[in-house]
Structures are given as structure tokens and as C-alpha cells.
Image (cartoon, rainbow, N blue to C red):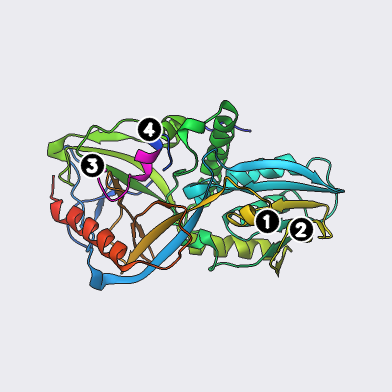
Amino acid sequence: MIAYSHPVLDQVTPTRREFLATGAILGGATMLSACAPGTEPLANVSASGPCLPKVRASADRAIRQLVGLRPYRPSGFVVRREAIDDKRLVHNYGHGGGGITLGWGSSKLAVDLGLPGHQGPVAVIGAGIMGLTTARLLQEAGQQVTIYTSQLPPETTSNIAGGQWYPSSVFSGSQLTPEFEQQFVAASAYSYYRYQLLVGEHYGVRWMPTYELSNRPINMGQVDRLIANMLPEMQTFEEADNPFGTLHLRRSYNMYIEPARFLRAIQRDILLAGGKITVRHFHDRGEVQALPEKLIFNCTGLGAAELFGDEELIPVRGQLEILLPQPEINYAYTNRRGLYMFPRSDGIVLGGTFERGQFDRTPQPEVSSRIVDGHAAIADAMRCA
């Protein structure tokens, strides 16, 4: 694995990064020069601090609600090879809230584990982020690939992800081992590298400043320390220079991926390169063994619990509110109340929730209200620093 060197909030639910700090979970964009749409960007934040346009968070601007079930394993995601009869099966699943982030890297580990010595066509089960990136990497290695899937984008869990490049809710810190830490860092580093090559409108990848809001001192969490060289230009702001009105503020630059655009583009790449996609649902392990391919990659996410008997794998429910787009919003934020905001071309993404063991995919009106009201309060407290 190549090493890549780069200098990289109180009651609803813990934040994505606060979960990581406690061990449980969870660029190029510029600041705006005035608190109004259509302002010209500045190359740097001024000495008096940034002035940011506000998200117009209100129920009448909501255009849809999304609910996704993250495939979470406290001990971390699985990249493992096993033999079934005369076939080779490679598992690549269980990435929690870090699926989009870790897609390229975890799939690279899986391909490197399964491919040596293999000849002939390859099967990939699943067409979410792991299945598509696995298939694309196999094609880059010269393999003929067929994807078998019960659901295609936009119906996969990956399509519902927010899309921030940050490996959140991936493992429990109390179960972190040196072996998994190495796997986690390697997957993060390769994904960080690959997404940089895809920045632009076609794949829906861009850099953007991300703010962490808090009234308590902000410390480096466990995951922050592991991927510190992948969080460039990290900077703290004094209260007087803080446009959010909180006592503490930290900013770093992250990549953001629009899942619908990215998954659609990768699927197109796979088909143009001669890949095949077959819609099929597998009921048990025996049906997987009956596939004609001798090398099979299991990228089924939550489906691995039933299909391969992984009893550690649990769903973690997350609900998102999507507001009408605001082109002037060119930043993202999180806070210690578990709220986060990402601007995308298809709307303003507001989160969030983190509910373990919940299988219900129905949006809950009371959760919608709590999310929108929480973000409205953040906007109301904002000022020009």
C-alpha cells in the first residue's frame, strides 16, 4: 500500500466526530466575502474572520426526506478471503457511516487480497459504493466482471449517504486493534488519493471548508488522529472571529461526493468498459456458491448478516432532510448536537440521527422537525465576524 502524505455538540445525538473522539463512531473551495447570495469568493479568510451566508432552514423549503441504514460493525469493516468448495470468496462490507469515504480504499484492499493467482471472469455481489468500486478496480486490473445485485442505483443505501469525505461511524474505539487500525488507515489513504483524481462536475467531487461548532474546547478525536494528514489546513478561530457565535470553532478542508452523480458515473464507466450487471437476489450462501465465476466479491452491506451469518452486523438508522438548493452556500458544518449540513447541487443536506438497531426506513415527522429547527437555530445565531 502506498502512503500518501498531506497535512489532512449536547442533546439530539452525538456528532459524527464526537462519536469518533469517544471511540464509538462517528478543498479548493473558498470563503464568501459577504452574507448574501451572489457574492464573490475570497482566496483567504481575512484577519477579522469569515462572513458566511446563512442556510435558510425551514420546513417549507424541504423537498424530500431520506432514511438510510448504515451497515455497522463495532469491530470495523470486513476485508477477508475464504474458500468455498473450488471458489474464492472475498468479503468487503460493514463500513458503517464511512462507506462512501472508504469505497475506493477498502475495495483496493479486497481486490489485492483476492486477485493474485486468479484467472477467468469475476463476480461482484452488490451495486452500492463497495460493489461498484470493486468492479471498477477489477476492470483496471484487466478482469472481466459481472455485478449481481438485487438493487441498482438510485435504490441502494449508498445513494442516500450525505457524501462527506470523512470515515465516520466505522468502528468502536474500545474494539480497535492494531491490525484493524492498519486496515482502516490504508483504506482511508487510498480513497483520499483516488477521489482527488475525480474532482469535478462529472463525478460530483469537490473540496469544501468544513466547520466544527462547539461551546467546549475541540480536541482531536481518535479518527482525527489516525487520518490527521488527510485533514488539510486545520485551523481554530477565536470567539471574535467566529461567524457561528459559538465559543469554539475549528475548520478543515474536506472532499464532498454527491452519491447520485458519482455512483451513476462509475456505473457508466463499468458498462463502457465491458462490464455486465445482472439483477438477481440471493437467498442463501448456496446460491452464491452456484455462480459460474470462481472468484466472488461479497459487497452486500447489511445483506451480509443474513446471507453469510454475520451476527455482529447491525443497522444504524440515519434520517436526512433535503432543502431547496442554495448556490451561495459553499461550506459545511457539524456541531455537538449531532447536526450537520452539506450543500450539494441537488439541495442542502441536513442531518442527522444515529439510531442503532433500527430497521424502519420510514421518515419520522418529529425527527424532521427537530433537524430543521436545530439548523434554523444555528443560522439565527450566525453573524459576520
Start-end of magenta stretch: 7-19
**Mark 4 belongs to which amino acid?**
Gly
> Seen in the image, is 353 located left or right of residue 276?
left
N-term-proximal mark, 3 vs 4:
3
Prevailing secondary structure of the magenta residues: loop
Nearest to the eye among marks 3 and 4: give it. 4
Q: Residue at x 37, y 45 (%)?
A: 16
- For label 3, the residue is 45
Q: Nearer the viewer, mark 3 or mark 2?
A: 2
User: Residue 265 occupies which quadrant of the picture?
Assistant: bottom right
* Quadrant, the N terminus: top right
One can see residue 125 in this view: yes
Task: Please indicate whether residue 194 sits to the left or right of residue 119 in the image.
Answer: left
Nearest to the eye among marks 4 and 1: give it.
Answer: 1
Tell me which label, 3 or 1, sits earlier in the chain: 3
User: What's the amino acid at mark 3?
Assistant: Val
Image position of 273 (left or right of 332): right
